[in-house]
């Protein structure tokens, strides 16, 4: 497949639409999070569902990550094939085909997985036993997100005990993640919600200890809550993903003050104005196939007064009160995705550009999004 760029060309010559990575901002984001985790003495296990790209996972590992998270078995296969040897599937895995594939992975890499039901424990154990494999198991608790997760306290303890006794399974601790907290706009509310989750998590850790089970890992946290969770003394392994790229939806969170680190936009979609027939409107060649809109509208980068709206499959409209604020026919612009995870999944390559802040920038890396479409 032809990539929309070649190494060494200027950004201006990159074809559209393309997934652009500002390498300078991206590297600063990775370093900032790695340094912060080290300074707080918590482990970092970045979520690879945000990029699905082994080249990026290797860069996160090189900065001290203990491993990566994946959400799907097929995604984990890509990471293990690429030499990432420590992967947590931060999710429940159900169904014989997936369990057999997971057991094969557990023979090749240090693998972990989550459970929230005794039936998953039984099937997982059977699959590991059949393959002669062992897997780390985290009991996922519901800390308020009301998605997956058994209730904290006794129900979680019962599952922990079952894991500890099951063949091929190693009780490794708790998965405690709340996706809602990540996007609570007000930092005080976000902090309070994270603190409540920390309390129930701590109570469950203590109840497990009462029956002799130590939580070697207490995993969770995303880009919106990692600082609160990382300083709580409850979580010891953080799983943020979006921090590496920062989307427009995370930019709608009011940042927390203090020494909570900030991240820069590093992922963009590069688009060209393909039609300019009405005053106050420019049509670009980037619609919701390349800029998913589940988290609201993407935002034109560094274009005050210009909004992106009414996306269709392959078109998006840029609108402005002042026509002169809009790019003209043939001009290319950067657009900040509203949600990085599904955006990466819609592209075959990251086009890594260096020197964007100084002007045009040059293509220095082309990385395949190898786990694109690995949703099974
Ligand atoms: N951990 C789990 C279990 C998740 O589901 C997610 C994202 O939804 C994350 C971590 C990473 O979150 P973020 O990309 O918001 O940093
Ligand atoms: Mn996401």
Image (cartoon, grey):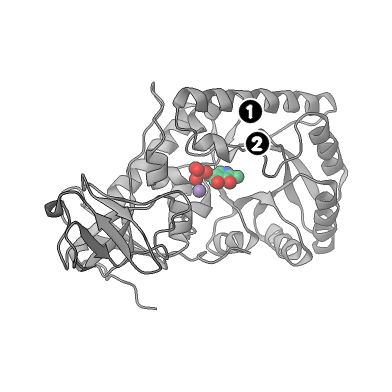
Image location of residue 139, percent across then percent down: 74, 40
Near mark 1 (Cα within 10 A), the count class, few <14, some 14-19 or many ≥20, is many
Secondary structure category for the residue under label 2: loop
In this rendering, position of residue 212 left or right of residue 88: right
Q: Nearer the viewer, residue 305 or 80?
A: 305
Write down the quadrant of residue 141 in the picture.
top right
The C terminus sits in image quarter: bottom right
Q: Describe the element under mark 1 as helix, strand or loop.
A: helix
Q: Residue at x 43, y 51 (%)?
A: 59
In the figure, 100 relative to 57: above or below? Answer: below
Residue occupied by mark 1: 197
Measuring from the top left, give residue 135's x and y in whole percent: 74, 51
Residue at the spot x=24%, y=54% of the render? 319
Query: Is 369 situated above or below 186?
Result: below
Q: CA distance from mark 1 to mark 2?
A: 8 Å
Instruction: Give x and y (percent) for residue 85.
Output: 59, 54
Numbered label attached to residue 176: 2
Closer to the camera, 270 or 89?
270
N-terminal of the pair, mark 1 or mark 2, is: 2
Q: Is mark 1 within 8 Å of ligand 1?
A: no
Give how far across and how far down residue 315 sits, in percent.
33, 67
In the visual, does 124 lie left or right of 141?
right
In the image, which is nearer the foreground, mark 1 or mark 2? 1
Q: How many marks?
A: 2
Asked if one can make out residue 66 in the rendered structure from this viewpoint, the answer is no
112 is higher (above) or lower (below) than 107: above
Corner quadrant of residue 153: top right
The residue sitting at the bottom extreme is 1
Q: Residues within 10 Å of mark 2 (few under 14, many from 20)?
A: many
């Amino acid at each position: 497949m032809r990539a929309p760029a070649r190494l060494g060309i200027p950004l201006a010559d990159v074809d559209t639409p393309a997934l652009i990575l500002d390498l300078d901002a991206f590297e600063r984001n990775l370093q900032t999070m790695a340094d912060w985790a080290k300074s707080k003495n918590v482990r970092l296990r970045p979520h690879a569902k945000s990029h699905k790209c082994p080249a990026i996972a290797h860069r996160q590992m090189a900065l001290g990550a203990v491993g990566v998270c994946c959400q799907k078995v097929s995604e984990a296969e890509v990471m293990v094939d690429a030499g990432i040897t420590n992967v947590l599937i931060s999710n429940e895995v159900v169904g014989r085909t997936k369990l057999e594939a997971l057991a094969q992975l557990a023979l090749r890499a240090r693998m972990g997985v989550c459970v929230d039901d005794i039936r998953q424990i039984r099937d997982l154990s059977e699959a590991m036993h059949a393959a002669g494999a062992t897997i780390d198991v985290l009991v996922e608790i519901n800390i308020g997100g009301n998605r997956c997760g058994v209730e904290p306290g006794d129900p979680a303890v019962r599952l922990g005990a079952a894991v500890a006794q099951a063949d091929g399974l190693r009780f490794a601790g708790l998965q405690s993640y709340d996706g809602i907290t990540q996007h609570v706009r007000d930092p005080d509310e976000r902090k309070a919600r994270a603190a409540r989750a920390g309390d129930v998590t701590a109570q469950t850790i203590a109840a497990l200890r009462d029956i002799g089970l130590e939580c070697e890992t207490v995993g969770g946290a995303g880009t919106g809550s990692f600082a609160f969770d990382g300083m709580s003394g409850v979580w010891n392994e953080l799983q943020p993903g979006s921090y590496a790229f920062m989307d427009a939806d995370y930019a709608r969170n009011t940042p927390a003050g203090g020494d909570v680190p900030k991240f820069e936009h590093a992922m963009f979609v590069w688009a060209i104005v393909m039609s300019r027939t009405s005053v106050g409107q420019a049509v670009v060649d980037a619609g919701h196939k390349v800029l998913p809109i589940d988290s609201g509208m993407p935002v034109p980068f560094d274009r005050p007064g210009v909004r992106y709206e009414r996306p269709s499959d392959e078109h998006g409209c840029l609108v402005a009160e002042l026509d002169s604020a809009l790019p003209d026919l043939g001009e290319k612009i950067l657009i900040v995705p509203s949600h990085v995870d599904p955006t990466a999944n819609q592209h075959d390559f990251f086009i890594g550009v260096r020197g964007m802040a100084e002007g045009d920038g040059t293509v220095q890396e082309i990385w395949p999004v190898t786990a694109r479409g690995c949703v099974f």
